[in-house]
Amino acid sequence: MKGLLKFITCGSVDDGKSTLIGHILYDAKLLYADQEKALELDSKVGSRSGKIDYSLLLDGLMAEREQGITIDVAYRYFTTDNRSFIVADTPGHEEYTRNMAVGASFADLAVILIDASQGVLVQTRRHARICRLMGIRYFVFAVNKMDLVNYSKSRFDEIKAQIVKLKDELSLKNIKIIPLSATEGDNVTVKSDKIPWYDSVPLLEYLETVDIDSENDEEGFYMPVQRVCRPDHTFRGFQGQIESGSISAGDEIITLPSSERVRVKSILVTDKNVKTAYAGQPVTITLDKEVDVSRGCVLIKDTNIAPYKRLTVSLLWMDDEPLTVGKDYLVKLGTKTISGILTKINYAVDVNTGEHIKTEVLSKNGIAVCEILLAEAIVADLFSLHKTLGELILIDRVTNMTSACGVVENLSEKGGAFSDRATFKLNNLEARGDIFEEFYYDTSSLNVLKYRTVHNTYTIGDEIPTQGESYKYPESFDIIVLRDNVAVKIRNKRITEIIPVSEYKYDKVPVVNGRGFEVAASSDKEILDFLSEYSKINDQSQKEFFAKWLCFDTYRKIVMEKL
């Protein structure tokens, strides 16, 4: 028996998507007796003169039945003797394109219906582009309503030529073209004798046998951290779903964006310890030492994933308000949500011709390639290489509505430990130099952004820049970089010690954290309390910890600067 197939039906309005799926369920005897009886009774008051209206099985909303169109995405689960299926029946009307995109995001295969009397339409092209954008690699073009064109081979050949042209335009690789009639059942579940010139299999048989390449070909192991589990001070586990590869107890992994190397101490699947876990499994991973990891971070092994600050993305705009350059959005990618500015629309795509159009504005249901600048570097990758780290949504900060969905096409400005950032280093001890970040207020987006102007690595004896455009530190102070577990002592602008935090003793000079904020501690006891409380914080208590211990404006300010 073949594995599970997740597919979507899409196309223009009234192309017969709901009718097609309803007919499959009915013909394949996949309905309960009461469902079948209710369908037959409902059809008698419908629009087909008492004949069975198969679309009623899926068009459940009253508004859909009254309008004769699908509005919501209807999911159906069914199993034949040869395969299990999940199908998403999606809206055809342009107004509900966003709903269709949601359905496409989950599917492995798309069944795109085309009305034989109308051929390939603009909405057909839009849906094919969106399916391609969402990473669908297998397509079935179902030329429906062949009964309305008298099962004409010549008409089918005309439409087939249009489909082949669209295939070449979008670089689609795996396609199947099937002539059928969803209302009459021709080539839906059994081969039709009314279409003798078609010498291949009917739709259901094709869906049962198509070999979807489900093998995970993404490089290495990676797991976006969904949650930090800290029931008490003795346990700290990082929870998430493994998106690629496998992980075993004892493996060395890298935490991003901090780039710390650690070993896996244990792996739990539900409440059971396992030696190895694989792609698709939700797990809890514990590590052999304390690291700077929270929701939005990523654990990796045997892959070159890294944090980036600038993304080039292909977007489907879903908001009623047009997209405009310079606006600030929340960007959700993987398990991370962060502020970002849409800085440029490289070009919009004409859904009918594929032409690239220069524009500064994008209206609803438009597709464009854009540039996004993030408030700080986050872990991301190309959609073609690591899907989960290459797909994103934009959220309007005011309405909290999803404004766009899209995929990452290019990356620039590496961040985190991968950038040429200033660090303090002595032998095996290394701490990031976030104290040298500049904080600018961008007047076009009304947002605070961080930039780095210092790119040196400092060690004992080096003089450091205690003053920048947005920061000014004393000539003598201490830095405690909590996430790197390193303390740095500065005297008369020069580094005198770089030591593990466990060896640090308070020396009656100002203390700052790794980002340059004053630590509100002025005694040995307060420093010990500060470090002790940090070792126990979790996602819920993090804000309270920083509010209690850090003074944000002692040595820092925000400089007015336009991008």
Image (spheres, rainbow, N blue to C red):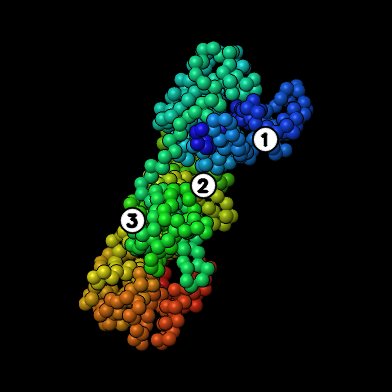
* Few, some or many residues within 10 Å of mark 2 (<14, 14–19, 20+): many
Q: How many labels does the image show?
A: 3
- Residue 404 is tagged as 2
Q: What element carries label 1?
A: loop
Marks 1 and 2 sit apart, C-alpha to C-alpha, by: 26 Å
Residue 433, horizontal then vertical, whole percent? 32, 69
**Which of the two discs, 1 and 2, labels the residue nearer the N terminus?**
1
Report crowding for label 3: few under 14, some 14 to 19, many 20 or more residues within 10 A (C-alpha).
some
**Numbered disc in front, either 3 or 2:** 3
Q: Which of marks 1 and 3 is nearer the N terminus?
A: 1
Q: Nearer the viewer, residue 337 or 140?
A: 140
Q: Distance between the residues labelled 3 and 2?
A: 24 Å
Could you tell me residue 39's position as x and y percent?
73, 30
Which residue appears at 48% of the width and 20% of the height? 160
Identify residue type, mark 1.
Asp
> Residue at the spot x=41%, y=39% of the render?
215
Residue 227's tag is none
Quarter of the image where the C terminus is located: bottom left
Name the residue that disc number 1 marks.
59
Q: Which residue is located at x 65 percent, y 28 percent?
A: 29
The kind of secondary structure element at disc 2 is strand
What SS does tag 3 mark?
Answer: strand
Contact flag, marks 1 and 2 (Cβ < 8 Å): no
**Residue 416 appears in the picture as rendered:** no
What amino acid type is highlighted by mark number 2? Answer: Ala
Picture quadrant where residue 194 is located: top right
Q: Can you identify the residue that label 3 sits on?
A: 414
